[in-house]
Amino acid sequence: MPLTALIYSILLLSAAINFDKGQNIFLISHLSLIYKESFKSFKNSKEYLLISPSKKTITINITTPSKEKQEQKNDNVFVFSTAHQAIIKETLYELKKEVINDDTTMEDFKRVIESCISKKTDNPDSSIKLELQSQHCAMFLEAFFIPFVHLFTLHKTTLKESCRYFKYATVENYSAINYDSINKKGRKLITNAHKETYAKILENVKSQLSKKLT
């Protein structure tokens, strides 16, 4: 403790004793001033700095997602314009009966495209029934549907990802496509008629997109 602070402490103690005895009233009347000066001196000393609590500053950094990350979250969301829906309508007209079941709606087709884009791995809410035998499904997907999705949305899908949203025709009903089965050598067949149909539709899609979406 500094000498000044020690002296003031002694004076305070002495004043308190004298006050108790009724003496040295003048000194006692200045007790408040002496105390303030003593504390001020002590406050500036090293001892005070050592025992006084230090202030801690907590800095909270609030960060917001960058615009780039926000855009990445929306990368798998595709908005169908009026032009897109018109193209889907024309496509379904060309595919129905021979390739796709006649009951397939535009909403069914859109949901399958959206599912391929988002790469959902759970059971799809909607699937499209094909009027094809299982050995013709792989080429339908590789020669038509996969390039169609890429042209339409600029997103890439694969045979394994897309086949889960389609069913092939059996004698009595429709069955889910098995990727391991349709991907085997010798199981990827296509008729000339179907090949021409797929090529014709894709060419039409390219033409329509260049006209309506520019």
Image (tube, rainbow, N blue to C red):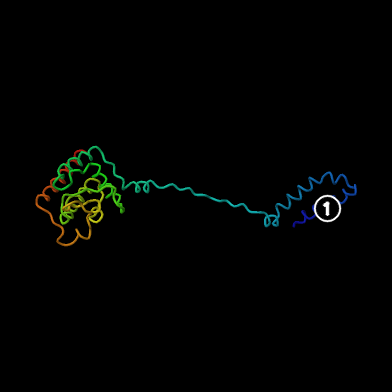
Q: Quadrant of the N terminus?
A: bottom right
Residue 113 rendering spot, x and y as whole percentages:
25, 47
- Residue furthest out toward the front: 172
In the image, what residue occupies the spot 18% across and 61% down? 184
Taking 60 as reference, is 201 left or right? left
Q: Is residue 53 left or right of residue 85?
A: right
**Which quadrant of the figure contains the C terminus?**
top left
Other-residue count near label 1 (Cα within 10 Å), few / some / many at <14 / 14–19 / ≥20: few
The answer to whether residue 213 is visible is: no
Q: Which residue is mark 1?
A: 13
Judged from the image, the secondary structure of the residue bearing numbered disc 1 is: helix
Residue 140 or residue 127, whichever sits in front: 127
Q: Is residue 18 left or right of residue 136?
A: right
Image location (x, y in percent) of residue 140: 17, 52
Instruction: Tell me residue 173's x, y (percent).
Output: 19, 51
Residue at point 29%, 44% (across, down): 78
Residue 204's quadrant in the figure?
top left
Residue located at (20% from left, 60% from top) = 181
Give the residue type that dot 1 points to.
Answer: Leu
**Residue at the farthest left position:** 192
Which of 185 and 32 lies nearest the eye of the viewer?
185
* Relative depth, front residue between 104 and 31: 104
One can see residue 118 in this view: yes
Horizontal and vertical percent for residue 35?
78, 48
